[in-house]
Image (cartoon, helix red, strand yellow):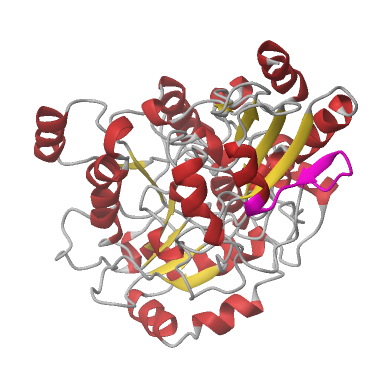
Amino acid sequence: MASATASISSHSIALRDLKAARIGAVRQQVAVPAAAPKGQRARAVRPLCAAEPSRKPVSASAASAPVAPVEEEASAAASVDYEALALELVDASPLEIMDRALDMFGSEIAIAFSGAEDVALIEYAKLTGRPFRVFSLDTGRLNPETYQLFDKVEKHYGIHIEYMFPEASEVQDLVRTKGLFSFYEDGHQECCRVRKVRPLRRALKGLKAWITGQRKDQSPGTRASIPVVQVDPSFEGLDGGAGSLIKWNPVANVDGKDIWTFLRTMDVPVNTLHAQGYVSIGCEPCTRPVLPGQHEREGRWWWEDATAKECGLHKGNIDKEGQTPKVGVNGNGSAEASAPDIFQSQAIVNLTRPGIENLLRLENRAEPWLAVLYAPWCPYCQAMEASYVELAEQLSGSGIKVAKFRADGEQKSFAQAELQLQSFPTILLFPDRTVKPIKYPSEKRDVQSLLAFVNTLR
């Protein structure tokens, strides 16, 4: 993957920014604009006027920093082959991609900031030396720590974040009709549509391009094919109609660990929730810390299937069945045939469909069995592979058989009906004298937690 770290060379940058020299280099020299006067936050470009989509864009002369005329920007952007540009930039650093985006769109592009590690986008924008805009969706249900980060970021960079809010009447109708926590019962999509998707749609109607912090490694089956730049397949921009909005994903090819190396090196303010085990951060009722052996996205909407962990903001990047053969899972959760198998160990029995059916029918088993229902493409399964293999080796010769059953694809409906499968991975204990298997209830998948479960019921 592309490196998330870069250095810049310029006589006008501050000493702190020179820390980037420790972790790479980019080709372009940049200069940081002068800091805002004390007590006053800079506004490099005009405010987001998304609530008034019919309003004409102001000319570039209205901005506090020089940018290309709006007419020239529109003409240049319209003539670009974005698929070819994405291929051209596939190995570019996030700083190079950010610089290209801001250069092409000037005041008609903005960074979408969620209050998590995507603060890296703001740091990259600052390092380009170009004026930039930042907007955020305030759902009304964010953590206090996220609001505190918004304030720190505004002060640190001398900017104003342009907040977008849901329509009060829509929130009122939803809560009065279905209550405050209906998403735990019938899914999060309706609440996200009211509190996030519709406000985002209004925001984007005031722009010609936007910048997101999407990464390919963030979510199973939904983000594995994200390009660094694309024509937005879901939302419309300022000019209206299909193809009127461009979406930039500068860190699409970056590993999460590299993002954090960059943030620490540049001493960027971050959400204090990260220090409490939170990785992916959204609204307070739908976000929790991840546990040992869990993928970062498992802290979001944990009561739903792994392939449903999207709120709708990036639905155009969700892979559909038959459309993205390179991806390990399609929209229905069936696995790609070429996905390499996992849980490879001589201590783990590979159960076939007849084998696990026979295990289900037995009333008196000679010995208890522990089995994981898995899909090899699922990052949550991949994350627990090492602990499960270690557990199997510890239990070898103890009188407990440890097994695996691949439960995706054609086996998924059977596993849902007969094996209590709701999401991957699912762990079952088949006791020696009980017909019905017992489902492991916790999401702690470290060796000690799994061993305690087995020893309690053996």
The residue positioned 39% from the left and 59% from the top of the image is: 315
On the image, the x and y values in percent for residue 220 come to 57, 52
In this rendered view, identify the residue nearer to me: 25 or 186: 186
Horizontal side of residue 182 vs 416, given as left or right: left
Q: Is residue 214 above or below residue 309?
A: below
Q: How many marks?
A: 0
Whether residue 14 is visible here, answered yes or no, is no
Q: Is residue 17 above or below residue 102?
A: above
Residue placed farthest to the top in the image? 456
On the image, the x and y values in percent for residue 355 come to 68, 48
Horizontal side of residue 346 vs 356, given as left or right: right
Provide the residue span drawn in magenta. 343-354
On the image, the x and y values in percent for residue 406 come to 65, 51
The residue positioned 49% from the left and 75% from the top of the image is: 322
The residue positioned 58% from the left and 56% from the top of the image is: 129
Whether residue 282 is visible here, answered yes or no, is yes
In this rendered view, identify the residue nearer to me: 138 or 350: 350
Q: Quadrant of the N terminus?
A: bottom right
